[in-house]
Structure formats: C-alpha cells, structure tokens
Image (cartoon, rainbow, N blue to C red):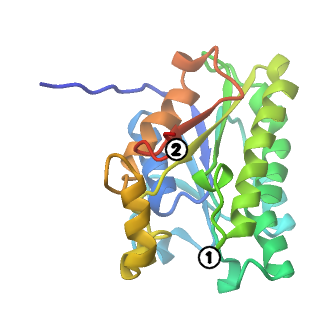
Amino acid sequence: MTNRISFDFSSARVLVTGGTSGIGHAIATAFADAGATVTITGTRNGPGNYEVDLTRFSYQQVEMTDVATIDALVASLGELDVLVNNAGANFPGGKDEWEPDSFATALTLNLVGPMRLTTGVRDRLAASTMHGGASVVNMASLAAFRSIPIVPGYGSAKAGLVTLTHNLARQWVHDGIRVNAVAPGVIDTPMTAPMAHFPELLDPELAHTPMGRLGTPEEIVGAVQFLASSAASFITGHVLVVDGGYLLP
C-alpha cells in the first residue's frame, strides 16, 4: 500500500541555513526535489569542500556568529519565499557551555544569528507571491522544553527561538509571513552521532522515546514542508514536535 504525500514548490525560492549535512541537507534536497530553487549555507570555503554533492544548490559561506557574513548573505539574496533556520550546534568550539563565554557563543550561534538573518530578509519575504504566503520555519529542539544540563547554552537558545517564533508570528502576520518552528526529537545526524559511543547517554534517550529508536532526517522534512506549504496557510506561531513520542506525559 502506498501512503505518500508530495509537495509542489515549483518556482519557490528557498534558503536553508546549515544545508550541508544532516537535517538541513535533507530539507534542502526535499525542496529541490519539489521544484524549488534552493540556496544553502555552510561554514566551509565552498561546496566542493564537503563530502556530499551540493551542486544542485547555490552555496554561501556563513558563520552564524559572524555579523558580516550574515549581512553579506542578506545582501546577496534576490527574491525569497521560504527561510529555514536550521544552522546551529552545541558545544561551540568544543567548549563547556557552562563557561560564560561559551554559553554566550551558543546563544549567538543558535538564536542571535538566526534572528539577525530572519529580520534581515523580512522585506524579501513580505514581497513573496507564493500561495499561502511566505514562510519562516525555525529549527527548535526538545532542549527548549526539558532540562539537558550538558548543553545549557544550546537549550536556552532553542527556548529563546521558540519565543522568537511566537513573537515574529504575531509581529509579521499582516505582512503575509507565517513563522513556525519544528522541534525534532533525537535524530540520527552527525551532531548526535557521538552519542553512539556513550550508551549511558543514548540508552536513556531511547528508553524515554515510546517509538524506541532514533528518528531520521527524512522524518523531519515532511513537517518543514507542510508548514511552508499552502496546506498550512492558517498556521502561524506553532511549534510542531517530531519526537517519536518523547514529550508524552
């Protein structure tokens, strides 16, 4: 039995930050497969410096902690219909997030940088003629809703991103821009790969997930595309949790 949904984003202009691997790459690929023109960002000098084929995307080198590169990205963009704020990471620079400077870097990387980019492209999004309106989809995290003491900066930033989603949704509602977020559970990506070597970290997460497994990047894609599509034209300020049941009471 076939039970598949496909989206048509023909002629849409989409920007996916952190689109070189993991969830971001899966999202960028899905939008390209759906007919969109996709720009991705990464931290390396060029697309040829990655192990995956990025030739179907436009590429911009951006550091979300670097104001100049964010502003350069904004200035380089033409028309824009969808922004997916996916770029982010924990343990910035490999440092302990309980150190104040590292905590501050985590906030900049995962909250302040995305906020600067999003407000920078407001006029482009407001000019969109895409059916259902322009869309911002922020990538939140379960760390926004529960304590994960090992990454206090990352969790605080993601909680802030949820609140930013709510405020932008209300602030921009009359500009025809919908702002939503997706909060993935524990997903099998390069960022979570180190957990496989520490059963004391991974096993409790799996035990707490009713589905009993890691999610895949492809299982996040549908939620992002749905929120960006006309099927969600009456949805704004919402956080869609995709977690295998993790947050069930």
Look at the numbered disc 2 and give the secondary structure of its residue: loop
- Pointer 2 with pointer 1, Cβ within 8 A: no
Whether residue 171 can be seen here: yes
Q: Is residue 93 left or right of residue 199?
A: right
Q: Is residue 192 left or right of residue 42?
A: left
What residue is disc 2 on? 247
Q: Amino acid at mark 2?
A: Leu
Q: Residue at x 32, y 55 (%)?
A: 213
Callout count: 2
Q: Amino acid at mark 1?
A: Asn
How far apart, in angstroms, are the residues tagged by discs 2 and 1?
39 Å
Question: Considering only vertical position in the picture, is 21 above or below 51?
Answer: above
The residue lying toward the viewer, choosing from 21 and 138, is 138
Mark closer to the chain start, 2 or 1: 1
Judge the density around disc 1: few (<14), some (14-19), many (≥20) Cα neighbours within 10 Å: few
Q: Position of residue 141 (x, y in %)?
A: 60, 52
Q: Residue at x 70, y 54 (%)?
A: 158
Question: Considering only vertical position in the picture, is 171 above or below 190?
Answer: above
Question: Considering only vertical position in the picture, is 240 above or below 140?
Answer: above
What residue is disc 1 on? 45
Question: Considering only vertical position in the picture, is 2 above or below 205?
Answer: above
Look at the numbered disc 1 and give the secondary structure of its residue: loop
Q: Is residue 63 left or right of residue 104?
A: left
Q: Position of residue 247 (x, y in %)?
A: 52, 44
Whether residue 84 can be seen here: no
Quadrant containing the N terminus in the rendered view? top left
Look at discs 2 and 1 and give the one toward the viewer: 2
Residue 248 is tagged as none
Q: Position of residue 80 (x, y in %)?
A: 68, 36
Q: Position of residue 222 (x, y in %)?
A: 43, 35
The residue lying toward the viewer, choosing from 180 and 84, is 180
